[in-house]
């Protein structure tokens, strides 16, 4: 286990020590980390009650590194990443990846802008305004992903399109609506709104992990 964590965290700490962390640097780093099947096995943490189980390997004010073990057939909710940028590498399996945009005509709603299957080894780049969701694709092998994100965040914006709601969810939660832990929900706002549109509705809290 420690060998698996060290092989990821060591290079990440080097990147976090740089004055600035650009999205391209995150993508490059995510692609350069070499892990054996045994090391990936040691990092998995399934949680069938959630879209994925989270194993946080590093969490500083500048960089968060996490491995997700996905529950087959369960999508995470459409969400942003608190204005940070990030890279997601498919370590095992494949991802059904959705990118969403906010439409205002004839009503405010999330619209699917792009969908594709990301295969093992592919890296998904997430900009500060990206809204996306994903799930393990295909029946052959459950998905495992490596996530690198800049900055610690106090909250994510998570969407419930069926309920026409926008939720502000604690940054230490995953990309789902934590109905089993309502204390992680900071606000439920009727309608579909972007982060900058609701910033004045939420007092920033210190980040938790």
Image (cartoon, helix red, strand yellow):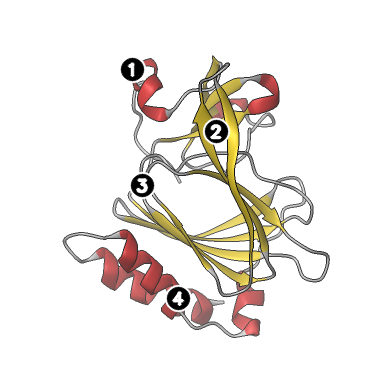
Of callouts 4 and 2, the N-terminal one: 4
Quadrant in the picture for the N terminus:
bottom right
- Residue under label 3: 84
Q: CA distance from mark 2 to mark 3?
A: 15 Å
Residue at figure coordinates x 34%, y 27% from the top left = 204
Residue 133 is at least partly visible in this image = yes
Of callouts 3 and 1, the N-terminal one: 3
Q: Is residue 8 above or below residue 18?
A: below
Image coordinates of residue 33 in percent, x first then y, are 45, 79
Of callouts 2 and 1, the N-terminal one: 2
Of callouts 1 and 4, the N-terminal one: 4
Q: Under tag 3, what secondary structure?
A: loop
Residue at figure coordinates x 20%, y 59% from the top left = 20
**Left of 7 or right of it: where is 69?**
right
Q: CA distance from mark 1 to mark 4?
A: 37 Å
Q: Nearer the viewer, residue 2 or 25?
A: 25
Q: Under tag 4, what secondary structure?
A: helix
Image coordinates of residue 63 in percent, x first then y, are 34, 57
């Amino acid at each position: 286990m420690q060998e698996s964590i060290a092989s990821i965290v060591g290079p990440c700490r080097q990147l976090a020590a740089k004055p600035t962390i650009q999205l391209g640097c995150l993508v490059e780093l995510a692609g350069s980390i070499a892990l054996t099947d045994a090391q990936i096995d040691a990092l998995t943490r399934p949680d069938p009650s959630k879209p994925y189980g989270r194993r946080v390997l590093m969490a500083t004010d500048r960089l968060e590194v996490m491995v997700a073990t996905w529950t087959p057939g369960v999508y995470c909710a459409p969400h942003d990443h608190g204005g940070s940028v990030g890279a997601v590498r498919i370590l095992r399996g494949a991802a059904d990846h959705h990118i969403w945009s906010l439409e205002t005509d004839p009503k405010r709603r999330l619209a699917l802008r792009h969908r594709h299957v990301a295969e093992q080894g592919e890296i998904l780049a997430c900009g500060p305004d990206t809204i996306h969701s994903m799930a393990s694709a295909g029946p052959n092998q459950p998905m495992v992903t490596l996530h690198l994100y800049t900055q610690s965040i106090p909250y994510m914006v998570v969407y419930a399109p069926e309920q026409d709601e926008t939720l502000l969810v604690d940054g230490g939660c995953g990309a789902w609506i934590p109905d089993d832990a309502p204390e992680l929900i900071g606000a439920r706002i009727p309608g579909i709104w972007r982060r900058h549109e609701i910033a004045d509705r939420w007092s920033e809290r210190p980040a938790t992990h």
